[in-house]
Amino acid sequence: MASDSAAEPESTWRFYALHAGVPALLALVVLGTFESTELDRRIQDLFYDPVKRRFPMRAIALFETVFHDFGRFSVIALGCCMLALFAASWRWHSLRRWRLGFLYAALCLAAGPIAVAQLKHASAIHCPHSLSIYGGDQPYLRLFDDVPPGWRAGHCWPGGHSSGGFAMMSLYFVFRRARPRLARAWLACGFLYGFWLGLSRVMQGSHFISHNLWAALVCWTIALVLYELMLRRYEPRDLA
């Protein structure tokens, strides 16, 4: 199978400027805006009923099933598919060129959500539905605010559910040199799927939108580090 474009030597500086520098700059601008303004709360207010003092979407079981359960299982299924393809590559020659890429993607699909889950476990931030401004009993605390003594941890940052979708962006790195168009499609689909899964939790009052953007940054960073460790050392012709 021919690649989308001829494999050419790649500048290390250009690679990191594009894949580390640009995301870092975007994160600084976008997440900095959320942390220094009331944008998070303004977005959250769109899904809150101030009369009944609750998030209406939180009580809809079908919403929970379609967006929460299916979203989680779909990412697990993709990870299992990557592992199955990795195993199959030992038998079918046509898959051998992608063997390491399949393993890499499976690791990213697991490592991204696990890393986000660990950050959540250590987080003092509470979910919107637990905050007094949204009918709960906890005060509002920004990410970089000082945690008051005796504070009960909320374990709600970053967005765990969206991390599975954002971890799918890792398939961009599997195909970026040999199949650039397919790589860009995976990048777009992974980000949009993760954002949609995250937005569904925002609508239910389970996360602020910035929580999910932080999850995207974590998953991208892990994908980039694992790519450097596992795939980038190989010449493009080995994957083409």
Image (spheres, rainbow, N blue to C red):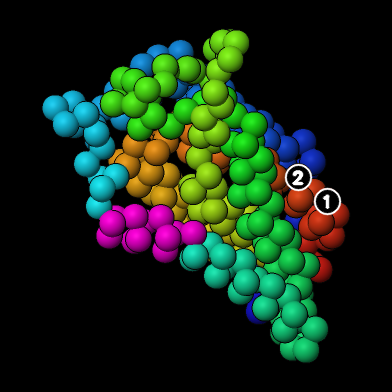
Report which residue position mark 1 lands on: 229
Which residue type does callout 1 highlight? Leu
Q: Secondary structure at mark 1?
A: helix
Looking at the image, the residue that sits furthest to the left is 51
State the residue at coordinates (26%, 48%). 59
Is residue 57 toward the left or the right of residue 28 in the image? left
**Residue 190, position as x, y percentages in the image:** 50, 54
Instruction: State whether residue 213 appears in this view.
Output: no
State the residue at coordinates (81%, 56%). 230
Instruction: State whether residue 228 appears in this view.
Output: yes
- The quadrant in which the N terminus is found is bottom right
Q: Is residue 203 above or below residue 98?
A: above
Q: How many residues crowd around disc 2 within 10 Å: few (fewer than 14), some, or many (20 or more)?
A: some
Is residue 122 toward the left or the right of residue 188 in the image? right
Which residue type does callout 2 highlight? Val
Q: Secondary structure at mark 2?
A: helix
> In this figure, what is the number of numbered marks?
2
Magenta span contains residue 125:
no
**Residue 54: quadrant of the picture:** top left
Q: How many residues crowd around disc 1 within 10 Å: few (fewer than 14), some, or many (20 or more)?
A: few
**Residue 186, position as x, y percentages in the image:** 53, 59
Mark identifier at residue 225: 2
Magenta part of the protein: which range?
61-72
**Residue 16, position as x, y percentages in the image:** 72, 37
Q: Are marks 1 and 2 in contact (CB under 8 Å)?
A: yes
Most prominent secondary structure in the magenta stretch?
Answer: helix
